[in-house]
Amino acid sequence: MQRYLLYNTALLFAVLPLLVIGCKDETSTPEVEILEVRVSPEEVQAGYISELVCVFSDSQSDGYEFRWEISGVSVERLDTTTSINTLFVKSPSEVGVYNNSVQVFREEEEITPKFDFTLSVVERNWKPEDPFYEEADLLYSTDDGLYLMNSGTKEVRKLSEGGPGVWSPEGDRIVFAQQRPMYNNFNIYTMYTDGSEQKVLSFDKSGNNFIESTRENYAPIWSPDGKKIAYTRCYSCEAGHSREDIILVSTVGDYTQKIITNNEFGNKSIGWFNDGEKLLISSEVNSEGQRGNFNDMYTITTDGLSKELLIKNAESNPRCDPALSPDSEYIAYTCGEDNELYIENLESGVINQLTDNDKWERSPSWLPDGSGIVFLMGDGVIPIWGNIYKISIDGSNLEKLTASVGKYYGPEWRPNRN
C-alpha cells in the first residue's frame, strides 16, 4: 500500500508541470486595459492639430488595431512611425468640449471596451506680450532677412531670416520663403507676427514622415479665408530648366498639398481672387504653347481644371511685379514703357499711371481696403536702392514710409491697419 501511494504521488508530481503549462498556454494572451488617452495640447486651438496618444497596459504594440471615434473633427493619420496608438486630428473650427472614444481590437476581436475621453477646443487667440507686434503695420525684406516696422514711430525689428513675407488675412501670421542651413533649397514657412511658432508647409513625403522639400519653393500667397496658401515650386532650377508648378497647401489640419498646374514652364503665383475659387498666375508659356519671356497672365481654378488667358503681356507694355487688388478688379504693376507705377482695370482694360518721375518703381502691393498701394521707389542713382512709399490709387498722397535709403524687397501693409 505504501509503495502504491509513493508511486501515485510521484506520478502526480510528474504530470503537474504539464497541467500547469497547459493552463498557461490557454491563458497566454494578456488582458489589455486602456489606461488613459493623452491629449496634446490639453486645450487645442480651433482649427489646429491635436495629438492623441492611447496609453494601454501592454507595452507591445504589434498586432493591435486602435479604432477611434472622434466627434466633430477631421481625422487624418499623419504619422504612425512611433506607435500605432498615436493619432493626429484637426480640431473643429467651433469652440467647445467634444466627446470621443477609442477601442482596441486584434484580428477583428474586441480586446477592450470603449474608452471615453474629451477634446477641449478653445478660440484661437494669439496675443503677443510686446505691444510692438500688434501695432507694427509694415512688413518688408532686405538681404539680411524679414523685418517688421511701425510706420508711425519708425521702429524696426527683425523677425526672421528669409523673405519676402505676406500677411495672413487676419494680420496675425506671416508666410515667407527661407533657405535654412540644413537644406539647399527654399521652403515655405508660417509664423506669428512676433516670429514665434514657425512651421514648414512645403513638405515632401518620405514613407510616413514629412520633411522639408528638396525643391525650390517661393512666392507664397494666402487664400482670402486664410485656410490655404498657394506657392510656386521649381523643379531642376539648378540646371536652368525652370519647370514651375503652383502648389496649394492647407494651413491647418493635415497640411494637404495639391498641384494645380501641369508640369509647365515658368508658372508663378500672383494672387487669389476674392471668391477663393480662382488664382491669378503668370506663365512663360503663351496661349499658343510657345515658351519664352512672355509672362502672360491667366486665371486658374483651385482644382486646376480651368485655365483662361486674362492678359497677354505685350512686349511694348510689359507688366512687371503684378499685384491683384483685394476686390479682384484691378492689378497694380510697374515697368510699362518707363518703369512707372500703374493700375489696370481687368474688365475694361483701362490703365491709369500713378507716378511720373525719373526713378524706378517696383514691388507694388495693395492696402487691404484697396484705397492705395505700397511700393519701392529707387533713389535715382542705384535702381535697386531706395525707400518704401505709400500712394492713393488716384496718384495722390504720396508718403515715404522708411527712414533711410536701403535695399528693400516686397513691402506689405498689414490688414486692418490703414
Image: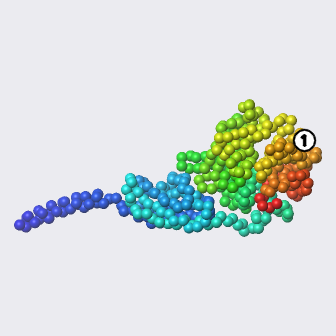
Q: Position of residue 323 (x, y in %)?
A: 79, 48
Q: Position of residue 72 (x, y in %)?
A: 55, 61
On the rendered structure, is 378 left or right of 77? right
Task: Name the foreground residue: 255 vs 35.
Answer: 255
Quadrant (top left, top right, bottom left, bottom right) of the C terminus: bottom right
Residue at 58% x, 50% y is: 210
Residue type indicated by callout 1: Asp
Outermost residue, right direction?
357
Relative to 151, does residue 270 appear above or below in the rendering?
above
Task: Name the foreground residue: 406 vs 303.
Answer: 303
Residue at 68% x, 48% y is: 277
Relative to 139, does residue 321 appear above or below in the rendering?
above
Residue 197, visible in the rendered structure = yes
Residue at 79% x, 39% y is: 311
On the rendered structure, is 256 left or right of 299? left
Residue at 52% x, 57% y is: 87
Relative to 411, does residue 32 appear above or below in the rendering?
below
Q: Which residue is mark 1?
A: 338
Q: Position of residue 135 (x, y in %)?
A: 79, 65
Q: Position of residue 121 (x, y in %)?
A: 59, 65
Mark 1 residue element: loop
What colour scheme was applied to this rendering of the protein? rainbow
Outermost residue, left direction?
1
Residue 181, visible in the rendered structure = no
Q: How many marks?
A: 1
On the rendered structure, is 340 left or right of 19? right
Q: Residues within 10 Å of mark 1 (few under 14, many from 20)?
A: some
Quadrant (top left, top right, bottom left, bottom right) of the N terminus: bottom left
On the rendered structure, is 35 left or right of 179? left
